[in-house]
Image (cartoon, rainbow, N blue to C red):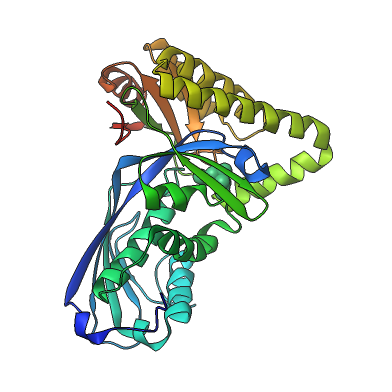
C-alpha cells in the first residue's frame, strides 16, 4: 500500500490506535548475532488518537504521558526529546505533504527507556493510527516494516524483534539470519505470569548494542560461544513453554541472566532485583531488553503480587503482567 495513495472518501475525523509493550523472555543481544529469541506482548501499551491539525507545520505530537508531557514538532531546534522530533521528521519524509497537518495525542502506561518496547509500541501505534485515519488497510508485515523505519531512529540498527512482536501480539520465537527474519508463534500450555521491577532507565538500546559489539571484538570466539549458548537456552525455553514446564523455564531464565551478566549488560540493581525475586519464590528472573538499567522480569507460578510488593518495598517501581495468550 502506498501511503501517498489516499482514498479521500474514507477519511475520518479522529482515529484511535493502540500497540502493546513487550518483554523479551530470552535471547536479547544474542538475537542481534543471529541467535533465536522469545518475546511476548504484554497488557500495557501506547494509545494514539490521530486527527487533523489546523497547523500545516506538523506532524505534531502531543504527549499526554510519554515520559514527558508536552508538544513535539519535527523541528531540529524545537522542544521535546530529540528522537521524537527526528521520528516525526522521518514520518513527514515517508508520508509526504499529507503528513504535515496530522496531529497525534499520545498516552502510555509503559515506563520509557526501560527495555519494555515503549518506542516500538509508539512506532506501531502511530503507523496503525495513521492508516485508520486515512481509511487504509494494512497487512501485518507492511505495518511492521513501516514501524521498523521509525524504530531505526530510536534504536540504530535493531534486530527487529521489538516491533515484530508488538505488531503481531502474542508470544513469538524470532530469529534473524542476514536480512531475513523467521517468526514462529508460540502457544504456552499455561498462562505466563510475571512481576516486573524497574531499576531505572537504561542508557539506550543502540548504545548497549554497540558497547557489546566493541567488547565482543576483543574476544570474538568467547562471545560467539556465549551467544550460541544463549541460543540453546532459548530453544529449550520454547519447549518448556509449549509443554507447560514452568520450573524448567524459570531455571533457563536464571541461566540466561548469568550469560547476560557475563556479557556486561547487567548492573548491581538488576542483580538485586533478580535476587529479591528468587528469594520471594519466583521460578526465575532476568533482565529484559537491552539491559544496562531498565527492567527485570520474574516468572511466578501463581500470583505475582508478593514479588511486586517485595520490589516496591526495596524502593523500585514494579507491576505485574501476563502473556495475553495461553491457558
Ligand atoms: C532490545 O529490546 C533487544 C536487543 O536484542 C536489541 C535488538 O534486538 O534490536 C538488545
Q: Position of residue 79 (x, y in %)?
A: 40, 72
In the image shown, does 275 or 238 lie closer to the viewer? 238
Q: Is residue 40 left or right of residue 312?
A: right
Q: Nearer the viewer, residue 22 or 57?
A: 22
Question: If the image is split into quadrants, where does the N terminus sit?
Answer: bottom left
Where ligand 1 lies, by image quadrant?
Answer: top right
* Numbered-mark total: 0
Residue 101 in picture, x, y percent from top left: 30, 84
Left or right of 209 in this view: 279: left
Instruction: Locate residue 157 relative to residue 122 in the image: left or right.
Output: right
In what quadrant of the picture does the C terminus appear?
A: top left
Q: Is residue 304 above or below residue 184?
A: above
Q: Quadrant of residue 70?
A: bottom left
Q: Is residue 89 visible?
A: yes
Residue 257 shows in the view: no
User: Residue most toward the left?
Assistant: 13
Looking at the image, is 239 positioned above or below residue 147?
A: above
Residue 226: % across, % down = 70, 29
Q: Nearer the viewer, residue 103 or 235?
A: 235
Measuring from the top left, give residue 251's x and y in whole percent.
Answer: 51, 15
* Residue located at (37% from left, 11% from top): 281
Amino acid at each position: 500500500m502506498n501511503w501517498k495513495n489516499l482514498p479521500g472518501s474514507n477519511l475520518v475525523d479522529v482515529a484511535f490506535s493502540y500497540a502493546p509493550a513487550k518483554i523479551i523472555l530470552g535471547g536479547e543481544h544474542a538475537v542481534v548475532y543471529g541467535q533465536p529469541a522469545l518475546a511476548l506482548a504484554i497488557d500495557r501499551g501506547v494509545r494514539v488518537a490521530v486527527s487533523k491539525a489546523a497547523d500545516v507545520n506538523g506532524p505534531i505530537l502531543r504527549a499526554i504521558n510519554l515520559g514527558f508531557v508536552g508538544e513535539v514538532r519535527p523541528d531540529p531546534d524545537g522542544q521535546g526529546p530529540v528522537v521524537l522530533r527526528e521520528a516525526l521528521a522521518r514520518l513527514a519524509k515517508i508520508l509526504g505533504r499529507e503528513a504535515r497537518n496530522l496531529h497525534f495525542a499520545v498516552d502510555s502506561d509503559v515506563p520509557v527507556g526501560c527495555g519494555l518496547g515503549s518506542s516500538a509500541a509508539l512506532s506501531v501505534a502511530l503507523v496503525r493510527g495513521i492508516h485508520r485515519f486515512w481509511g487504509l488497510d494494512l497487512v501485518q508485515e507492511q505495518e511492521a516494516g513501516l514501524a521498523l523505519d521509525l524504530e531505526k531512529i530510536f534504536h540504530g540498527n535493531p534486530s527487529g524483534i521489538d516491533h515484530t512482536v508488538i505488531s503481531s501480539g502474542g508470544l513469538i520465537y524470532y530469529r534473524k539470519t542476514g536480512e531475513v527474519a523467521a517468526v514462529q508463534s508460540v502457544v504456552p500450555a499455561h498462562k505466563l505470569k510475571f512481576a516486573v521491577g524497574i531499576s531505572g532507565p537504561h542508557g539506550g538500546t543502540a548504545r548497549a548494542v554497540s558497547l557489546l559489539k566493541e567488547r565482543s571484538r576483543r574476544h570474538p570466539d568467547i562471545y560467539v560461544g556465549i551467544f550460541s549458548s544463549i541460543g540453546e537456552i532459548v530453544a529449550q525455553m520454547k519447549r518448556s513453554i509449549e509443554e507447560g514446564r514452568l520450573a524448567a523455564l524459570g531455571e533457563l531464565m536464571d541461566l540466561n541472566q548469568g550469560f547476560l551478566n557475563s556479557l556486561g549488560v547487567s548492573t548491581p540493581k538488576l542483580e538485586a532485583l533478580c535476587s529479591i525475586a528468587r528469594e520471594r519464590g519466583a521460578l526465575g528472573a532476568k533482565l529484559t531488553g537491552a539491559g544496562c538499567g531498565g527492567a527485570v522480569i520474574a516468572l511466578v507460578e501463581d500470583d505475582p503480587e508478593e514479588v511486586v510488593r517485595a520490589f516496591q518495598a526495596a524502593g523500585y517501581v514494579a507491576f505485574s503482567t501476563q502473556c495475553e495468550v495461553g491457558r
